[in-house]
Amino acid sequence: MSTEPIQTDAVIVGAGPVGLFQVFELGLLEIKAHIIDSLAYPGGQCIELYPDKPIYDIPAVPVCTGKELTDNLLKQIEPFGANFHLGQEVTQVEKQADGRFLVATSKGTRFLTKTVFIAGGVGSFQPRTLKVEGLDKFDGTQLHYRVRNPAQFAGKNLVIVGGGDSALDWALNFVQEGPNKAESVILIHRRDGFRAAPASVAKMRELCDAYEMQFVVGQVTGYDEADGRLTHIKVTGGDGVTRTMPLDMLLVFFGLSPKLGPIAEWGLDLGRKQITVDTEKFETSTPGIFAVGDINTYPGKKKLILSGFHEAALAAFGASPYIFPEKRVLLQYTTTSPKLHKVLGVETPVFD
């Protein structure tokens, strides 16, 4: 790897939907970008949390999954040739004497950039773990906080812990007939009330009544192992009685805890662990650094993907003077502008 930093106009931190759309908005203004994400793939929360769940509030798209949204955004930004640096976290952002920023990552990649766009969602996600001493040694083998490959749970005896949508959704998924159907499913939650969609709760109770799965009120308080493998978990109910349950796999869905991580050390003004921005350019307290999407805060902020898209557009225009100080930037429309058609690599339509 070269020791010389990569010189660029813009670095985008976060490859979720808003970070990807930021590439598009910058591209229309002929601003090239490098994009960094701690995940090994683009898509952010959409891919990490709900790749197959439907999203209904993207304008002009009645319904799409998180994966479909990500795939379409990647296709949309193809003309702009953004460079992706995945599986690495930004560890340093430092203003230089010439006004540019030195950006460094956990893998040693370095940039000298005129502008920085923070599109890190609500930070990096860490699963909330099950606090049972010693259980963490099974993490990744028999203890799972996320389902990356549903096929590995097919035909297994599963215990699922949690009371939110993820716990209910996966419990129902593994009970249903299909290639990923489990041998058995036991759902455990600390109380007989859920934070999940009522239809999912109703379906779960229906399946329990039909003896196709079990629901137990209680908390995991211990486990048994044999030959280095997890064989049983111990569940203490509200009645104080501890029951032992055999299992092959333990899936825990207590939600994900967002952590700002190194961003908190960059000297930006923060409010409730979010980055404070203006509503004209979505610029932070440091000129040349912008924040878009769920990671920013301002009066009236709504954490919606479509709000992040709006913020990305204004942030791109706000950044242009740092990159092209002598250039007057005019608003042009992709429908009619021959210049934008050239940038996008499409033909300008001829109207009679």
Image: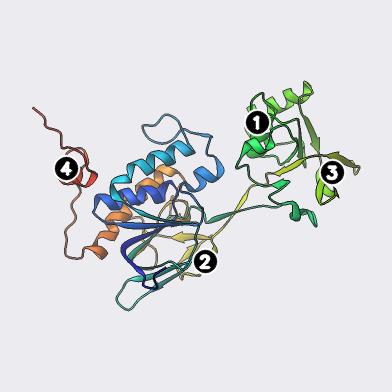
Q: Could you tell me which quadrant the C terminus lies in?
A: top left
Q: Which residue in the structure is indicated by mark 3?
A: 232
* Sequence-first tag of 3 and 4: 3
* Sequence-first tag of 2 and 3: 3
* Sequence-first tag of 4 and 2: 2
> Alpha-carbon distance for marks 4 and 2?
41 Å
Q: Which residue in the structure is indicated by mark 2?
A: 262
Indicate the position of residue 153 as horizontal and vertical percent values: 69, 37
> Alpha-carbon distance for marks 3 and 1?
22 Å
Disc 3 secondary structure class: strand
* Three-letter code, disc 2: Pro
Horizontally, residue 280 falls left or right of residue 236, namely: left
> Alpha-carbon distance for marks 2 and 3?
39 Å
Indicate the position of residue 342 as horizontal and vertical percent values: 18, 45
- Label 4 crowding class (10 Å Cα cut-off): few <14, some 14-19, many 20+? few
Of badges 2 and 3, nearer the viewer stands 3
> Alpha-carbon distance for marks 1 and 2?
39 Å
Q: Quadrant of residue 161?
A: top right
Determine whether label 1 and label 4 are within 8 Å by CB. no
The disc label shown at residue 180, or none: 1
The disc label shown at residue 337, or none: 4
> Alpha-carbon distance for marks 3 and 4?
65 Å
Indicate the position of residue 60 as horizontal and vertical percent values: 36, 32
Relative to 32, does residue 66 appear above or below in the rendering? above
* Three-letter code, disc 4: Ser
Write the residue at 43% across / 38% down. 69
> Alpha-carbon distance for marks 1 and 4?
50 Å
